[in-house]
């Protein structure tokens, strides 16, 4: 029994690390410009498809697609910010909530149009198989993806704390008008954080493409989960999103295992509702 | 609230007469069907507006109330042989209670937080119905066919009776919304929308009025759900509980003008024919083109005309004066 529990815990931890990387990008955008990017998980889908097509058409392994996805999604994020999101920054609150829904519907259906709604998979990635340690089967691509996610989150953390640009982003997150008075170009910071957030989720997509099904609507579930993770972790808190991501991964696996797999997401959403009831600002929010 | 001028009164009377005459004049089921969908979503948009437009609670979970209404009356009819009209009220009451149950934990959430909480709530309901044997899980329910009559809330020979019923429902919702907006509750909700702290400072019971708004909105949305079940005669979680329904409701309100009485009706009158027609023209191959247009439309409206059509017209009229 405890061996099973250990196996489930490790599984939850692995998927949780992926969630963290997805949510970290989202929380950064949310924190800096107070916009929820509902298209965030569709950017994940674009990352997954980029990796898939690079593999299928040119035989590039997903591991090598990681930087490509990062750069591509950085550009896409920048474009979406410049042409869509920046237009609603001063608009009514409702427009700010709804606009990225439009982006999400558009991107997901453009993918259906271009690539059909079929499920696809990368047949033979470089990393495959499992590593067996006694009772625990550790999937190698999942493990590598998780370690990669932690490394990238750490890199983001250092970037925000140590570089001038990173500090500017944090300053805007704390107080936009003061940051503006300090001579920070807040418009550029907005675009940059939207692009960085998108880039992170693109990288997550490349990781995920090593072992997950690839299809246009893949964003649906990941999207909802990442909103819960971000809100659970606390508004704009990167540490919070990281911890909440792992927590949700574990809760989801254990809930699915001990209760009913069909309800694993329902349990996560219920946990989220209970948390915001007790602590509306989330675990690490202020 | 100023009294309508003679010109306005004539306009509204003519509009109402045209709407009443529509099914008699226009033959063919498709136009009537489109009009029924317009009224259905206009009604849900009006109900959403009480929450989102006046109280700034941007609910993206209206599908949960819609589904609860549809399922309650259907289950009561199928398993206990309860008349659908009683089922309609029962569904409304149940949805209002669910709204209260979810409204209390969410009463301190604002903006995005409320939006996400409402999605989480609706998803829990959807997942549960998708796995609940009692309501036939994902298989869905086919309503038992009863003879045509108003009492049975079922008509097979013509769509016209459905048209008149949903028109009455819509008018009722508009009246309720108008009543709220011109009375104490409407002012309180708008005060809360302007500033939570200030409203609290004025002694407005913030939680109570937000709860009222959720319950009224849930009741009306559930009524629409029962209507949908009686009209389509088949429901499953995929058709009544999914997120796109909630999103469409928000868009209807926003396109027309959130926070105005007539806005959602205008929004539905523009959006629903567009989506029904693009679906018939382009969507039959499942290519996604219809939804791409829809997504692009959302982006354009929110970026360039976030006040909605009605808001735009009002601003023109103000400028003209």
Image (cartoon, coloured by chain):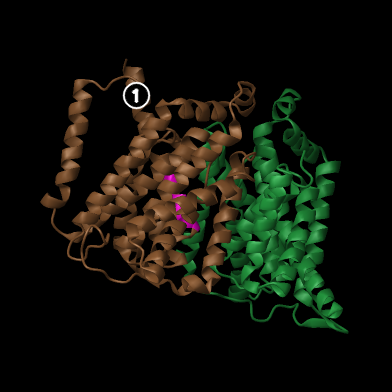
Chain colours: A green, B brown
Residue at the right extreme of this rendering: A134
In the picture, measured across the screen, residue A209 lies left or right of residue B152, that is right
Q: Is residue B109 above or below residue A12?
A: above
Q: Residue B251 colored magenta?
A: yes
- Mark 1 falls on what kind of element? helix
Is A33 above or below relative to A51? above
Residue placed furthest toward the left: B25
Residue bearing the label numbered 1:
B316
- Tell me the residue at 81%/71% (across/down): A10
Residue A238 visible in the picture? yes
Seen from the viewer's position, the closer of residues B68 and A43 is: B68
Magenta stretch: helix, strand or loop mostly: helix
Residue name at image x 52 percent, y 32 percent: A91
Q: Is residue B90 left or right of residue B210?
A: left
A281 is higher (above) or lower (below) than A228: above
Name the residue at 32% across, 15% down.
Answer: B321
User: Mark 1 Cα within 10 Å, few/some/many (few <14, many 20+)?
Assistant: few
Image side of residue B100 versus residue B253, left or right: right
Label 1 is found on which chain of the structure?
B
Residue B193 image position (x, y, % from top left): 55, 30
| Residue lying furthest top | B321
Q: How many marks?
A: 1
Can you tell which quarter of the image residue B42 is in? top left
Which one is nearer the viewer's eye here, A213 or A254? A254
Left/right placement of residue A89 relative to residue B30 reads right
Q: Which residues are magenta?
A: B243-252
Task: Report x, y in % for residue B248.
Answer: 43, 50
Q: Position of residue B316 (x, y in %)?
A: 34, 24
Instruction: Locate the N terminus of chain B by quadrant.
Output: top left
């Amino acid at each position: 029994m405890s061996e099973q529990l250990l196996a489930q815990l490790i599984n939850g931890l692995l998927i949780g690390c992926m969630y963290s990387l997805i949510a970290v990008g989202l929380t950064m955008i949310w924190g800096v410009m107070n916009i929820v990017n509902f298209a965030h998980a569709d950017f994940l889908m674009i990352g997954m498809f980029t990796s898939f097509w690079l593999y299928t058409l040119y035989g590039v392994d997903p591991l090598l697609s990681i930087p490509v996805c990062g750069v591509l999604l950085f550009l896409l994020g920048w474009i979406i910010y410049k042409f869509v999101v920046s237009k609603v920054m001063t608009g009514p609150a409702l427009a700010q909530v709804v606009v990225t829904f439009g982006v999400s519907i558009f991107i997901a259906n453009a993918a259906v149009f271009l690539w059909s709604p079929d499920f696809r998979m990368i047949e033979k990635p470089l990393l495959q198989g499992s590593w067996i340690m006694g009772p625990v089967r550790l999937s190698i691509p999942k493990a590598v993806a998780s370690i990669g996610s932690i490394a990238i989150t750490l890199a983001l953390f250092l970037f925000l704390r140590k570089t001038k640009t990173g500090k500017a982003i944090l300053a805007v997150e704390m107080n936009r008008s003061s940051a503006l008075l300090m001579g920070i170009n807040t418009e550029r910071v907005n675009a940059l954080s939207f692009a960085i957030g998108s880039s992170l989720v693109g990288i997550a997509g490349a990781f995920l493409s090593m072992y997950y099904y690839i299809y246009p609507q893949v964003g649906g579930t990941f999207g909802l989960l990442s909103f819960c993770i971000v809100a659970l972790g606390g508004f704009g808190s990167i540490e919070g999103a990281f911890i909440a991501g792992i927590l949700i991964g574990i809760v989801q696996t254990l809930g699915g295992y001990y209760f009913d797999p069909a309800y694993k997401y329902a349990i996560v959403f219920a946990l989220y509702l209970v948390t915001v009831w007790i602590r509306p600002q989330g675990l690490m929010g202020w | 609230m100023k009294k309508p001028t003679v010109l306005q009164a004539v306009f509204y009377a003519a509009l109402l007469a045209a709407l009443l005459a529509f099914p008699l004049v226009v033959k063919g089921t498709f136009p009537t069907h489109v009009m029924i969908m317009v009224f259905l979503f206009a009604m849900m948009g009006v109900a959403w507006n009480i929450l989102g437009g006046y109280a700034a609670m941007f609910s993206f979970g209206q599908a949960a109330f819609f589904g609860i209404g549809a399922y309650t009356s259907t289950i009561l009819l199928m398993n206990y042989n309860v008349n659908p009209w009683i089922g309609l009220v029962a569904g409304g009451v149940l949805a209002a209670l669910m709204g209260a149950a979810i409204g209390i934990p969410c009463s301190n959430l604002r903006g995005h937080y409320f939006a996400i909480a409402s999605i989480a709530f609706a998803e829990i309901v959807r997942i549960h119905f998708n796995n609940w044997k009692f309501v036939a899980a994902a298989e869905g329910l086919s309503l038992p066919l009863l003879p045509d009559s108003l009492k049975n809330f079922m008509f097979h020979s013509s769509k016209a009776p459905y048209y008149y019923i949903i028109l009455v429902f819509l008018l009722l919702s508009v009246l309720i919304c108008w009543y709220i907006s011109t009375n104490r509750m409407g002012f309180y909700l708008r005060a809360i929308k302007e500033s939570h702290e200030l409203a609290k400072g004025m002694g407005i019971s913030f939680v109570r009025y937000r709860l009222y708004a959720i319950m009224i909105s849930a009741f009306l949305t559930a009524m629409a759900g029962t209507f949908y079940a009686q009209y389509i005669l088949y429901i499953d979680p995929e058709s009544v509980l999914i997120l796109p329904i909630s999103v469409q409701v928000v868009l209807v309100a926003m396109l027309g003008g959130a926070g105005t009485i007539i806005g959602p009706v205008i929004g539905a009158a523009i959006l629903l024919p567009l989506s029904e027609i693009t679906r018939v023209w382009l969507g039959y191959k499942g290519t996604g083109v219809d939804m791409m247009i829809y997504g692009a439309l959302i982006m354009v409206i929110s970026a360039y005309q976030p006040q909605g059509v009605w808001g735009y017209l009002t601003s023109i009229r103000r400028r003209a004066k």
